[in-house]
Image (spheres, rainbow, N blue to C red):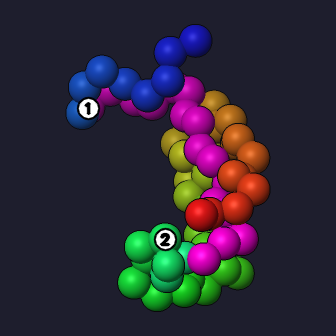
Amino acid sequence: MAWGTGDMYSQLEHVLVRTPTINGEFVIAGAWREPDKELLIKEHQEFSELLASLGATVTVAPAIDVLS
């Protein structure tokens, strides 16, 4: 199975997304602020649903345990 597409105009068929981690020291790790973790998960879910609604098969990988 191939992921993504080789160009900028073909329809995506298979997409791999990773659930965002909500554990870790975001600011220390280089983010400029602590994210809104509830919003982060909600937007990820909405993005995955959008991809699926456009016809892509969406595979969701688990979150990385902790951002360090």
Q: Mark 2: give few (<14), some (14-19) or many (20+) Cα within 10 Å.
A: few
Residue 1 at x, y = what percent? 58, 12
Whether the residues at callouts 2 and 1 have beta carbons within 8 Å, the answer is: no
Residue that appears at 41% across and 73% down: 30
Q: Mark 1: give few (<14), some (14-19) or many (20+) Cα within 10 Å.
A: few
Image quadrant containing the C terminus: bottom right
Nearer the observer, 13 or 44: 44
Identify whether 17 is placed above or below 30.
above
Q: For residue 40: magenta? A: no
Q: CA distance from mark 2 to mark 1?
A: 35 Å
Q: For residue 15: magenta? A: yes
Residue 51 visible to an observer of this rendering: yes
Nearer the observer, 12 or 63: 63
- The numbered mark at residue 63 is none
**Disc 1 element:** loop
Residue that appears at 61% across and 86% down: 36
Residue 14 at x, y = what percent? 56, 27
Residue 42 visible to an observer of this rendering: no
Residue 10 at x, y = what percent? 32, 26
Question: Would residue 38 appear left or right of 27 to someone viewing this image?
Answer: right
Residue that appears at 63% across and 48% down: 18
Question: Would residue 9 appear left or right of 33 to someone viewing this image?
Answer: left
Residue bearing the label numbered 2? 29
Identify whether 59 is placed above or below 37.
above
Name the amino acid type tagged 1. Answer: Tyr
Sequence-wise, the earlier of marks 2 and 1 is 1
Name the amino acid type tagged 2. Answer: Ala
Secondary structure predominantly adopted by residues drawn in magenta: loop
Nearer the observer, 51 or 22: 22
**Which residues are the magenta region?**
9-25
* Residue at the outermost left position: 8
- The numbered mark at residue 9 is 1
